[in-house]
Image (tube, rainbow, N blue to C red):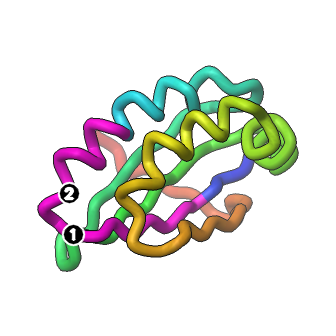
Amino acid sequence: MILEIAHFRIQSSADNPGFEAAFAIAQIILASMPGYLGHELHRCIEDPCEYRLLVHWNTVQDHIKGFRESARFAEWRALLQPFFAAPPSAAHYEARFTSHPSC
């Protein structure tokens, strides 16, 4: 399993509701992709124009070939692109150490 971390900067914090509404639709596309395992969208507390999308995939290829090179990616991007202040960036990570606090 790998973790994709994508960095989004939207144009204005006034756009938060619109961006998050668009993401609510876009996440349905994301979740339908082969190799998709789950995701979380986080908004920065100190800078509400900054978001991080964490997506778990089976493999890097599931993200690159299965999603980014699919026709569905164009749909996903069209929903979110109008809000971006800059092109998003993303990288892939593999876990080295994990810890889960007990409840």
- What residue do we see at 33% from left, 56% from top? 42
- What residue do we see at 57% from left, 61% from top? 5
- What residue do we see at 54% from left, 70% from top? 87
Q: Nearer the viewer, residue 85 or 47?
A: 85
At label 2, which amino acid type do we have? Asp
- What residue do we see at 75% from left, 25% from top? 34
What x and y, as percent, mark residue 54? 51, 52
At label 1, which amino acid type do we have? Ser
Q: Give the range drawn in magenta.
A: 5-22
- The quarter of the rendered structure image containing the C terminus is top left
Q: Nearer the viewer, residue 27 or 58?
A: 27
Residue where numbered disc 2 is placed: 15
Q: What element carries label 2?
A: helix
Task: Give me the C-alpha separation between circle 1 and circle 2.
Answer: 5 Å
Identify the residue at the far bottom of this view.
46
Confirm or deny contact between disc 1 and disc 2 (CB under 8 A). yes
Left or right of residue 55, residue 91 in this image: right
Determine the image quadrant of residue 8: bottom left
What x and y, as percent, mark residue 66? 81, 35
What x and y, as percent, mark residue 10? 33, 66
Residue where numbered disc 1 is placed: 12
